[in-house]
Image (cartoon, helix red, strand yellow):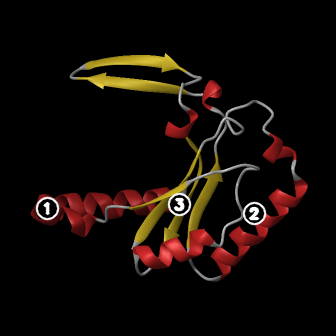
Amino acid sequence: MRFMAMVRATEESETETSPAMDDAELMTAMGNYNEELVKNGVMLYGEGLHPSSKGARVHFDGTSRTVVDGPFAEAKELIAGFWILEAKTLEEAIEWIKRAPNPFHGPSDIEIRRIYEPEGFGDLMTPELREQETRLREQMEQQ
């Protein structure tokens, strides 16, 4: 099963010059943790994200699209980084994340959510859609 572990943003991570970004010890600890995840076949992908001030949101309402530039209020509602993990169970994913260094100097949260697999869509995933999904994944891996 694949899981996404989302590092919730903090007031610290939403600043242009987050103190965590200048902390060599924290960067080393995170690099070592990521290396352990990769060596154990758990980490499929992971990245940190720039503050929301460098981003935008696209709001959908029917056929209408509205773009809102960052920054966004409520840092606790934002994502500062993520990992895509491969684990047998949610409990296993939790155990791996509990071993992560605290990504910030103060309190922080990492939310873990299971990623939908094609099988999770049942009959809605027709043979044509399964073929398309496989083709697209292969194309992404080649890029």
Asked if disc 3 and disc 1 are in contact, CB closer than 8 Å, the reply is: no
Residue 28, numbered circle: none
Q: Is residue 52 left or right of residue 13?
A: left
Label 1, secondary structure: give it. loop
Q: Residues within 10 Å of mark 3 (few under 14, many from 20)?
A: few
Q: Is residue 15 left or right of residue 45?
A: right
Query: Above or below — where is 11 with respect to 62?
Result: below
Looking at the picture, how far across and down is residue 100, in whole percent? 67, 67
Residue depicted at x 48% and y 56%: 140
Label 3, secondary structure: give it. helix
Q: Of label 3 and label 1, which has the lower sequence position?
A: 1
**Marks 2, 3: nearer the viewer:** 2
Marks 3/1: CA–CA distance: 25 Å
Amino acid type indicated by mark 3: Gln
Residue depicted at x 57% and y 34%: 75
Answer with the quarter of the image where residue 95 lies: bottom right
Q: Of label 2 and label 3, which has the lower sequence position?
A: 2
- Can I make out residue 78 in this image? no
Query: Above or below — where is 36 with respect to 4?
Result: below
Q: Residue furthest left?
A: 123
Residue 142, numbered circle: 3
Label 2, secondary structure: give it. helix
Q: Is residue 59 left or right of residue 105?
A: left
Marks 2/1: CA–CA distance: 41 Å
Asked if disc 2 and disc 1 are in contact, CB closer than 8 Å, the reply is: no
Q: Is residue 75 left or right of residue 15?
A: left
**Disc 1: which residue:** 126
**Disc 2: which residue:** 30
